[in-house]
Amino acid sequence: MLFVGNDWAEDHHDIEIVDDDGRVLTRRRLSEGLEGVTRLHALIAEQMPEDWVDLDPGEAAGLVKIGIETDRGSWVAALVAAGYEVFPINPMSVARYRERHSTSGAKSDAADAHLLAEIVRLDRAHHRPVARDTVEGEAIKLTARTHQSLIWDRTRHVLRLRSTLREYFPVALQAFEDLDAPDALQLLIKAPDPDQAARLSTATITAALKHARRRGVAARAQELRTVLGAQELRQPPVLQDAYAAVVASEVAIITALNVQIDRLGAVVGDHFGRHRDAEIYASLPGLGVILAARILGEFGDAPDRYADAKARKNYAGTSPITRASGTKKVVLARYARNRRLGDALQQWAFCSMRGSPGARAYYQQLRGRNIAHQAALRQLANRLVGILHGCLKTNTPYNENTAWAHVLQAAA
């Protein structure tokens, strides 16, 4: 075999190729892009052993193992498309491996390329190669991740807006329960300070409520008029104007994010609806289009990626870990995990209890054993991941009786 260490940067790649015995065959610095990856193919071809001549090109490419600290980007896609087995090594693992072999603290790109080559030569059995997901699965992952990131960004800006209003315009927090709602944003952009809010007319408030399709418009408009017109403490005029400018900026950002979240959500739904496993995911209780797309994207759709349900649970981070030393044994939650997938699975576990009597009964059993809410949700998510794996393995939609028969019998 040939083992390639690929230390990547934004504009170049440091490459080292070693053989089975760890002997360095070549080192190069290649440019990013088509020219660089073409040169890498040529370097690998130059170092191929003589007994590879009679091999099929696909078989020969499979004997090349590449270690790199990322699993994304056109460079990685090109390596996978060429048939090489690519191992995305966690940068933390590379750092620990570096400390294992050197205590001086020295570091360089060429040295990291050597470390990556050694890792795939000696320890590749402990690392997961890049999964060969379909392009449809990759598209779902990309759009669902970006959609989730936009929602997280909106949450951060809403919290900043709330913090700013609390300092000079606290009445607005009483008036608007959801600061990212269309009516709240429209009124705050028109009246970003208490003086302007007190002068808002009933007609202006009514128009904003109607545009947001609120119910009970007349009563709600009168309520807002009363709350916003109430007397309260004021900041000095100059400082109030500065706060109002900050609020106007945050409101504009949140408004734009709302538009883009809705647009990208439609794109996520479109990609998800065309996927071969969409029907199976949609059949599971608690999964809507967006949440199902997130979980599908993070798990991937390569059929042989997970050897069994336990492997999928370990990747999901829902299965516990055991720490045993001497006579002491402790079972703990697994916190080193895919944060996006963990967030989606927690939401799934919570939502599943509305549509699945079995999931609800299982959660109640856990709570009856004095297990805390979050721990119970984590165990429920772990069970749901196993059910999902079974459905995908057998290509069968979800069935409540099959999934929870033992739980429902015990609860009866």
Image: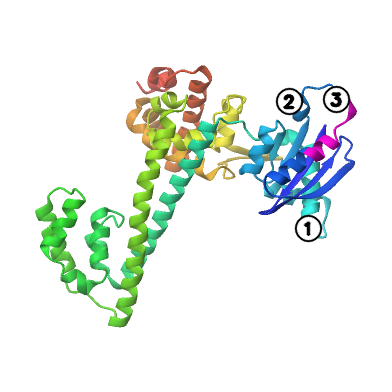
Where, by quadrant of the figure, is residue 315 drawn? top right
Q: What residue sits right under mark 2 in the picture?
A: 58
Q: Can you say whether 38 is above or below 281 in the image?
A: below
- Judge from the rendering whether residue 237 lies leftward or rightward of residue 127; answer left or right: left
Label 2 sits on a secondary structure element that is: helix
Q: Residue at x 14, y 55 (%)?
A: 220
Label 3 sits on a secondary structure element that is: loop
Q: Gap in Å between the C-alphas at discs 3 and 1?
A: 37 Å
Judge depth for marks 3 and 1 and give the one in front. Answer: 3
- Judge from the rendering whether residue 366 lies leftward or rightward of residue 50; answer left or right: left
Where, by quadrant of the figure, is residue 283 drawn? top left
Instruction: Tell me the chief SS of the magenta region.
Output: helix
The location of residue 209, given as percent across then percent down, is 17, 54
Q: What residue sits right under mark 3 in the picture?
A: 53
Residue numbers of the magenta segment: 42-52
Q: Is residue 154 magenta?
A: no
Label 1 sits on a secondary structure element that is: loop
Q: What residue sits right under mark 1 in the picture?
A: 107
- Is residue 221 something one can see in this rendering? yes
